[in-house]
């Protein structure tokens, strides 16, 4: 209703202005304008130009109305949905590539997680960065935390030792078995620090298999890297994936699910005794 009145007022105003311009033109032709405003050539020209522009605008008012509906038309487009669709189609869900593992970013993911945190590694060199965030997620938000580590006695542990040793200074050698055991010890501490009724939400399994990727997941956020020779996975390029229904995330989730199935539970009340009973 308001728009209709406004358009009517605009048309009337433009019509009056156009009519005034025509009257001025006729008055100039009959010499009446010189009698009213002698020597006023410049104002005459100005009035002629304005009347022409006004007449054009008067003819175009209906077409200019379309501009008033641009917001309404744009609101029909779900820009975020289109962006997500393009991201899934062209990038498989990849939204960023990090030069190395972004501890602060993953810690924020864990702190915001509402359902699940899953980590797949041979061992977790940077566990100390977010073990506190894991405790809070388990206790405060009742988040399910699943950790997959390489069995410390697995032959793969020795292979990974060799892979890290081939191009590194011997002083930088990693002992994979000792590193896995150190992680299990930290996770046992986390287990004992949370109330007994919350401990079941921290699950740890060890696997005896050659892992293809390292994965850090918090709800729909994934950080994925590879096991390269001479370099820890956290020091390798990290692919950040957003969304669980993308091409990349589905493949990564399949790997997580498969290794979880073949893994064996570790009893964190006594992880040493528990691991020793797991046959390879």
Image: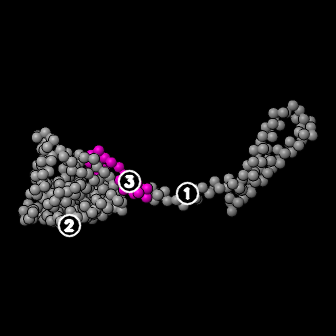
Q: Is residue 59 magenta?
A: no
> Which range of residues does the magenta coloring cover?
85-108
Residue drawn at x 39%, y 57% as measured from the top left: 88
Q: Which residue is mark 1?
A: 74
Question: Which is nearer the eye, 262 or 41?
Answer: 262
Q: Which residue is mark 2?
A: 261
Give the secondary structure at mark 3: helix
State which mark lies toward you, 1 or 2: 2
Residue drawn at x 30%, y 60% as measured from the top left: 251
**Is mark 3 in CB contact (under 8 Å) with mark 2?**
no
Q: Which residue is mark 3?
A: 91
State which mark lies toward you, 3 or 2: 3
Horizontal side of 274 relative to 232 (left or right) equals left
Residue 65, position as x, y percentages in the image: 67, 55
Residue drawn at x 73%, y 49% as measured from the top left: 57
Give the crowd class for mark 3: few <14, some 14-19, many >=20 residues within 10 Å.
some
Question: Which is nearer the eye, 102 or 170?
Answer: 170
Horizontal side of 210 relative to 10 (left or right) equals left
Horizontal side of 278 relative to 218 (left or right) equals left
**Looking at the image, is mark 3 or mark 2 earlier in the sequence?**
3
| Marks 3 and 2, how far apart at CA | 29 Å
Residue 46, position as x, y percentages in the image: 79, 37
Q: Is residue 91 magenta?
A: yes
Residue 168, position as x, y percentages in the image: 15, 41
Question: Which is nearer the eye, 149 or 184?
Answer: 149
């Amino acid at each position: 209703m308001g728009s209709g009145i406004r358009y009517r007022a605009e048309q009337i105003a433009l019509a009056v202005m156009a009519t005034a311009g025509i009257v001025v033109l006729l008055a100039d032709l009959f010499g009446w304008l010189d009698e009213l405003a002698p020597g006023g050539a410049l104002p005459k020209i100005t009035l002629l130009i304005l009347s022409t522009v006004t007449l054009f605008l008067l003819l175009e008012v209906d077409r200019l109305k379309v501009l008033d509906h641009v917001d309404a038309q744009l609101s029909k487009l779900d820009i975020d949905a289109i962006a997500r669709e393009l991201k899934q189609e062209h990038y498989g869900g990849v939204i960023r590539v990090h030069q190395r593992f972004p501890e602060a970013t993953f810690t924020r993911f864990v702190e915001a997680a509402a359902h699940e945190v899953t980590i797949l590694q041979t061992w977790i060199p940077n566990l100390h960065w977010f073990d506190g965030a894991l405790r809070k997620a388990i206790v405060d938000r009742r988040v399910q935390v699943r950790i997959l580590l390489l069995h410390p006695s697995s032959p793969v542990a020795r292979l990974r030792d060799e892979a890290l040793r081939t191009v590194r200074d011997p002083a930088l050698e990693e002992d994979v078995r000792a590193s896995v055991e150190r992680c299990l010890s930290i996770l046992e501490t986390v287990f004992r620090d949370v109330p007994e009724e919350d401990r079941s939400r921290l699950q740890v399994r060890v696997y005896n298999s050659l892992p293809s990727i390292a994965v850090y997941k918090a709800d729909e956020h994934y950080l994925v890297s590879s096991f390269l020779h001479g370099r820890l996975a956290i020091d390798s390029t990290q692919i950040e994936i957003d969304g669980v229904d993308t091409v990349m995330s589905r493949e990564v989730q399949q790997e997580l699910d498969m290794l979880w199935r073949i893994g064996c539970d570790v009893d964190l009340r006594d992880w040493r005794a528990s691991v020793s009973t797991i046959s390879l």
